[in-house]
């Protein structure tokens, strides 16, 4: 049984409400934190080795220590709750069922960073969650956890919930800041980084919901203790949202020590693939990370078992590995078509491109049109190379990572599933009636023996 | 002497000392010539412009003297400031040349290529860019994107199909006029320059959006389809204008003034903004005091045949040995495209006039 930290009290009824949360040890971390100095909290978070849970995996403590602290300028903590990545819904679970854990994390982090006005930017489609959060904020405020002079420390803090209007791009931190300021959600050019000039040109830290919630157990356990959970640089626990062809889709907390195989097939987690079908492919970290065929997913190119953590999932780079990303675990069985799947993702990125810089604005639409042709049996063999060339010229040449996120799934699909694309071109009629199937994607990879 | 420290930056093996805070693009412009990256959206006179078109991407092979690590990605030179000891590769980097070729392809992807009927043809930044950096054919096989035509008033014609989303006109209206009435609607490939509810653009200085537009998306309605720019002669002129500097460029044919624009410098940027009155209403020679023919770059089609004595200085030759180390490749090698031209057939050895049979 893996250790649960964030969802420890998940089974308790009414944990959503303040009284139950408080009775079960809630706000203990906040009490402890207000006896510490802000610098010590940052130090604890640094020691914990906590990495950003939003996708990039940047060490949170380091991000916090970059925050500029000019005299007389307010600083802000902004929580990125604009969880719009296809396949990712872990933050929704936290905010919906554990709002007080989230608010406690926000409070401690605000105290550590000196943010008197903290914002939660929540995606517009989560229409009912702002009400839950606002109710929880009101409860916390009534009990003296927010407002003026919290616990007699002299620290004031208010949390505001800001609804987005339904744009994936506003999950990019600088676009989120623009949108929060009331402007069109276009990503900004970096530098200046938000840590220097963010919201209203004030120093700002933007963190994911899960990252901020994880601050609570870090304070409770202490940074060193927290760092003992997990392996290597993947410390602590991670929430994964599982969807696709598995018996038990949902949100799971893992401590990063289980293998991918165990995660998919054990009854504790996903419970295997339904209807006796076979695993064909999987996207381990949300739609923008590279897709992996079954053989490379379960074993690395070196033939070792792959684990569910940052390092192991990215073992082999993009050639044979993938990324932990935001934890959106999408499983595809042998009845799924990778071409169609890639087309769906390309349509998404085409729809969500902000239109600011040319490679992404024009390239995403072009890729979608070509993939549509391939999927519906109108493709040419040269289209596959063309797709590769387009994604190569989008990647790295755009202002924000949306261009990369649009290019990677296409690149990985062609890299690993090229024969499926070719089959679509060679069998335009058959491809409309049946899928390519599992083919050799689960076959063991030949690992050359070392001398 | 100013107090800003000087930074040494090397662009394509040519070093220059520039004040701290200068962008790579501006440093390259100080060197001039072929090492200057093209810019479609950056406009030195407009605050916050740049970074969007990505044509000015360059490779930074050495970050600075203190931190010599190269930058992992290509950077937009118009928004990246130089560091002391920075080394930048523009035309000497195959990565940059390749990326730029891709960007030009992306920009032209949905561009209607209606140059034969476009008023901007001949002074179009996109034409110049694609001629210098693009490939000869597109690989796009789909229907090009179109927008509904929108009427934005009696003076300015908006042709959204041609727009490349440089945001320059939005910045101009924002920074030059008191009330901006147009902006970007929608997102992604359907983003468009538009006014809410079909308002007409109405402001004393709004005509300047025509000059900043790098393509033919915003053109002068009073000049619409009247003439091709290369048939008209540009002359510098001024008048005593109560609202603006009055320094303008007249585009004449004979004694007739076809068009009035602001004067542009060697980077195609406006020197002084002019008002709508000068631009749209003063179309008689008697309104103006003519100073003399404008200096037009030799490479421009506008210079063709007109001004032997006034074409400006000849372009500085590329420092082949220093910069690239090899002869430049021609943009368009006709023999690789055309099946008709066969360079190996010696025309002088053919009896009589050449016939298509001789090339089979």
Image (cartoon, grey):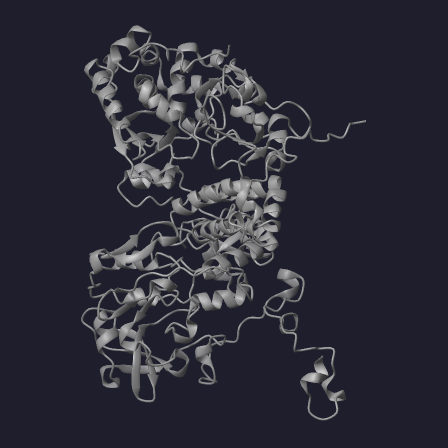
B340 to A235, vertically: above or below: below
A39 to B314, vertically: above or below: above
Count the marks: how many? Answer: 0
Residue B93 x %, y %: 60, 54
Looking at the figure, which quarter contains the C terminus of chain B?
Answer: bottom right
Looking at the figure, which quarter contains the N terminus of chain B?
Answer: bottom left
Question: Residue shown at 46%/42% (left/top)?
Answer: A344
Query: On the image, which quarter does residue A28 sit in?
Result: top left
Q: Residue furthest top?
A: A23
Residue B99 x %, y %: 54, 54
Q: Is residue B271 visible?
A: no
Question: Residue shown at 40%/49% (left/top)?
Answer: B3
Nearer-the-camera pick, A4 or A58: A4
A308 to B149, vertically: above or below: above
Residue A172 x %, y %: 39, 38
Nearer-the-camera pick, A425 or A445: A425
Question: Residue shown at 30%/40% (left/top)?
Answer: A179
> Does residue A66 appear to the left or right of A284 in the view shown?
left
Residue A136 x %, y %: 25, 19
A38 to B244, vertically: above or below: above
Nearer-the-camera pick, A365 or B328: A365
Q: Is residue B309 visible?
A: yes
> Does residue B340 appear to the left or right of A281 in the view shown?
right
Q: Residue furthest right?
A: A451
């Amino acid at each position: 049984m893996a250790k649960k930290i964030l969802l420890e009290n998940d089974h308790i009824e009414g944990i959503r409400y303040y009284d139950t949360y408080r009775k079960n040890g809630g706000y203990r971390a906040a009490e402890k934190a207000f006896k510490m100095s802000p610098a010590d909290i940052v130090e604890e978070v640094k020691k914990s080795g906590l990495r950003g849970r939003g996708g990039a995996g940047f060490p949170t403590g380091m991000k916090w220590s970059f925050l500029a602290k000019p005299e007389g300028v307010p600083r802000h903590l902004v929580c990125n709750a604009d969880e719009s990545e296809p396949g990712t819904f872990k933050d929704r679970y936290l905010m919906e069922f554990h709002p007080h854990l989230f608010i406690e994390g926000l409070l401690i982090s605000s105290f550590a960073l000196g943010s008197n006005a903290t914002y939660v930017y929540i995606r517009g489609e989560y229409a009912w969650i702002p009400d839950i959060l606002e109710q929880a904020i009101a409860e916390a405020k009534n009990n003296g956890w927010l407002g003026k002079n919290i616990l007699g420390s002299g620290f004031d803090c208010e949390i505001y919930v800001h609804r987005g209007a339904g744009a994936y791009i506003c999950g990019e931190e600088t676009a989120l800041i623009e949108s929060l300021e009331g402007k069109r959600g276009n990503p900004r050019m970096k530098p200046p980084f938000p840590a220097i000039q963010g919201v209203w040109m004030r120093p700002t830290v933007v963190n994911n919901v899960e990252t901020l919630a994880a601050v609570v157990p870090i304070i409770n356990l202490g940074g060193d203790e927290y760092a003992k959970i997990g392996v290597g640089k993947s410390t602590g626990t991670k929430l994964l949202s599982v969807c696709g062809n598995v018996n038990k889709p949902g949100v799971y907390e893992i401590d990063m020590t289980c293998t991918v195989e165990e995660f998919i097939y054990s009854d504790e987690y996903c419970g295997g693939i339904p209807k006796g079908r076979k695993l064909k492919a999987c996207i381990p970290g949300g739609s923008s990370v590279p897709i992996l065929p079954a053989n490379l997913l379960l074993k690395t190119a070196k033939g070792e078992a792959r684990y569910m953590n940052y390092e192991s999932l990215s073992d082999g780079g993009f050639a044979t590995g993938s990324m932990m990303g935001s934890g959106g675990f999408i499983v595809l069985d042998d009845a799924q078509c990778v071409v169609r799947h890639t087309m769906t993702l390309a349509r998404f990125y085409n729809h969500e491109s902000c239109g600011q810089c040319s490679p992404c604005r024009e390239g995403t639409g072009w890729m979608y049109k070509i993939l549509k042709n391939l999927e519906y049996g109108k493709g040419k063999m040269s289209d596959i190379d063309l797709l590769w060339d387009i994604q190569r010229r989008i990647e790295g040449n755009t202002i924000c990572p949306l261009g990369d996120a649009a290019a990677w799934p296409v690149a990985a699909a062609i890299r690993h599933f090229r024969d499926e694309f070719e089959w679509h071109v060679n069998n335009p009629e058959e491809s409309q009636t049946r899928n390519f199937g599992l083919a050799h994607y689960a076959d063991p990879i030949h690992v050359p023996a070392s001398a | 002497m100013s107090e800003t420290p000087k930074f040494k930056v090397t662009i394509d093996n040519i070093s220059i000392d520039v004040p701290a805070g200068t962008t790579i693009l501006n440093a390259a412009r100080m060197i001039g010539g072929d090492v200057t990256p093209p810019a479609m959206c950056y406009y030195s006179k407009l605050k916050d412009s740049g970074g969007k078109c990505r044509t000015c991407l360059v490779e930074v092979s050495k970050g600075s003297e203190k931190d010599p690590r190269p930058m992992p990605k290509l950077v937009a030179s118009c928004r990246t400031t130089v560091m002391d000891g920075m080394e930048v590769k523009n035309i000497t980097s195959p990565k940059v040349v390749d990326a730029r070729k891709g960007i030009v392809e992306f920009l032209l992807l949905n561009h209607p290529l209606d140059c034969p009927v476009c008023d901007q043809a001949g002074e179009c930044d996109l034409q110049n860019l694609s001629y210098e950096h693009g490939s000869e054919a597109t690989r796009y096989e789909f229907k090009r994107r179109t927008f509904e035509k929108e009427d934005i008033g009696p003076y300015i014609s908006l042709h959204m199909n041609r727009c490349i989303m440089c945001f320059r006109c939005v910045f101009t209206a924002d920074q030059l006029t008191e009330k901006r009435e147009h902006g970007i609607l929608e997102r992604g490939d359907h983003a468009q320059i538009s006014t809410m509810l079909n308002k007409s653009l109405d402001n004393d200085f709004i005509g300047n959006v025509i000059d900043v537009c790098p393509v033919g998306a915003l053109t002068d309605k009073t000049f619409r389809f009247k003439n091709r720019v290369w048939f008209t002669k540009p002359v510098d002129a001024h008048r005593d204008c109560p609202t603006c500097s009055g320094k303008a460029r007249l585009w004449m044919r004979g004694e007739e003034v076809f068009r009035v624009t602001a004067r542009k410098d060697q980077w195609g940027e406006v020197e002084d903004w002019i008002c709508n009155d000068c631009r749209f209403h003063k179309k008689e020679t008697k309104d103006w005091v003519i100073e003399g023919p404008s200096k037009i770059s030799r490479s421009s089609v506008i210079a063709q045949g007109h001004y032997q004595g006034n074409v400006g200085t000849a372009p500085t030759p590329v420092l082949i040995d220093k910069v690239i180390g090899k002869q430049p490749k021609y943009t368009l090698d006709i023999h690789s495209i055309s099946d008709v031209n066969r360079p190996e057939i010696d025309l002088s050895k053919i009896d009589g006039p050449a016939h298509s049979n001789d090339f089979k």
